[in-house]
Structures are given as C-alpha cells and as structure tokens.
Image (cartoon, rainbow, N blue to C red):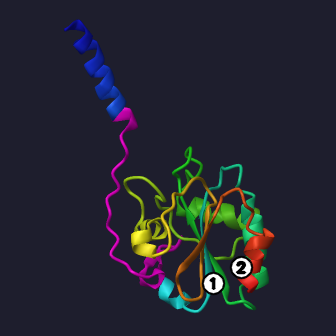
C-alpha cells in the first residue's frame, strides 16, 4: 500500500508534465487568402491582396541567435518583391525562450533601426501551443493546408506559399532566407 502512495503521485506528476498541450482549433479558413490579420500598426492586413504572388511567411524574434536573418529577409524582399511577384510576411512570436518580449512599437522600432525592414510585419502572435493563431493552425495542419502537417520548431521557420495560395514548402529555421533553394523557388 505504501508503494501505491509513492507511485501514484509520481505517475500523476509525470502525466501532468508530459501531457500534450491541447490546441484550441478555431480555424475555419480554407485558403491563405481567407485570412485577415493585424499588422504592427493595428491595421487589417488582408491576404487576399496577395493573390498571384509567392509568399514567404516567417515567425520572427528580436533576441534570437537567428535574428540576423532579418538582414537576408530584407535583401531578398528588395531583390524580388517587384520583379517576381514575391513578398514576405513576418509574424513576431514569443514562443521560444521569450525571445520576442516587446510590444508592437518595440518590434517595429527594432526591425527598422537594426535591419531596415520594409516587408509587412504583423502583430505578435503565438505560432504554437494552446493559443496558436489561426493562420499558423492553417500552415501547420494538413487538414487545413491540404499539403502536410508540420510543427514550428524555432524562430525564423519559413512557410513558402505558391502563386495559387497553396503551401509548397516548409523551410527549417536554420536555412537562411537567401539560400539558393529559396531563391530558386522565388525565381522559378
């Protein structure tokens, strides 16, 4: 009986620690073009205005070892935005070791002062966990995006959306935005 009193609390504790977080699924969208999100200024950003463009969606953070990727993101945005019907949409997120602690004003100032960011940046959201934003539910679940299930593994993970609005590739955070495989995708 004493053993039961010892084992039961351990099992309950282990269950509590290792249980999978339940994500509240709120997504009812069937296309990337169905999404309207808020930008850093609090204005509506309607993805339907991007029809016909290739889109790179990336979760960002200002205090991450990968933060210098902002520089490459801005470079490819400037190089291919007009000539290739390409855009980047950034979503600041504080889901990994609290590496995006600022508010919208802090994030905007950081991006402009340090990296000259001019591509669209949205309000800070959750890209994983029980409060995962609808757009990231869409990007990470095959039942919504029609292509594949995936997980956001760290800051600066890239989701490549084709001109038809369909998810085409999920790119590891460690792969730089100006990697030849990404540039080839943009230009083909």
Q: Is residue 28 magenta?
A: yes
**Is 144 displayed left or right of 150 in the figure?**
left
Q: Residues within 10 Å of mark 1 (few under 14, many from 20)?
A: many
Say the numbered circle drawn on residue 182. none
Which residue is at 46% across, 75% downward?
145
- Which one is in front, 67 or 43? 67
The quadrant in which the N terminus is found is: top left
* Cα gap from disc 2 to disc 1, whole angstroms: 9 Å
Q: Which residue is mark 1?
A: 54
| Label 2: element kind | helix
Residue lying at 72% horizontally and 70% vertically, measured from the top left? 73
- The residue closer to the viewer here, 78 or 84, is 84
Of residues 169 and 65, the one nearer the viewer is 169
Circles 2 and 1: CB atoms closer than 8 Å? yes
Residue 175, image quadrant: bottom right
The answer to whether residue 115 is seen in the rendering is no
- Comparing marks 2 and 1, which lies closer to the viewer? 2
Residue 111 sits inside the magenta stretch? no
Give how far across and how far down residue 154 sits, in percent: 59, 53
The residue lying at 29 percent from left, 17 percent from top is: 7
Element marked by disc 1: strand
Secondary structure mainly formed by the magenta segment: loop
Image coords of residue 2 (percent x, y): 23, 7
Q: Residue at x 61, y 72 (%)?
A: 169
Q: Is residue 113 visible?
A: yes
Q: Is residue 10 above or below residue 179?
A: above
> Magenta span covers which residues?
16-45
* Residue picked out by circle 2: 185
């Amino acid at each position: 009986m004493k053993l039961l009193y010892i084992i039961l609390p351990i099992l309950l504790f282990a269950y509590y620690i290792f249980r999978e977080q339940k994500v509240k699924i709120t997504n009812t969208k069937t296309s990337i073009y169905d999404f309207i999100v808020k930008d850093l200024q609090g204005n509506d950003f309607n993805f339907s205005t991007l029809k016909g463009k290739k889109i790179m969606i990336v979760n960002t953070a200002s205090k991450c070892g990968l933060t210098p990727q902002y520089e490459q993101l801005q470079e490819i945005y400037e190089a291919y935005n007009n000539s290739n019907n390409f855009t980047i949409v950034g979503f600041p997120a504080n889901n990994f070791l609290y590496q995006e602690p600022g508010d919208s004003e802090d994030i905007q100032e950081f991006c402009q002062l340090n990296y000259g960011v001019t591509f669209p940046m949205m309000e800070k959201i959750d890209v994983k966990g029980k409060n995962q934003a609808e757009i990231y539910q869409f990007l990470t679940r095959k039942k919504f995006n029609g292509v594949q299930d995936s997980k956001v593994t760290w800051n600066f993970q890239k989701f490549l959306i084709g001109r038809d609005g369909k998810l085409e590739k999920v790119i590891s955070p460690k792969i730089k935005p100006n990697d030849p495989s990404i540039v080839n995708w943009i230009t083909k």
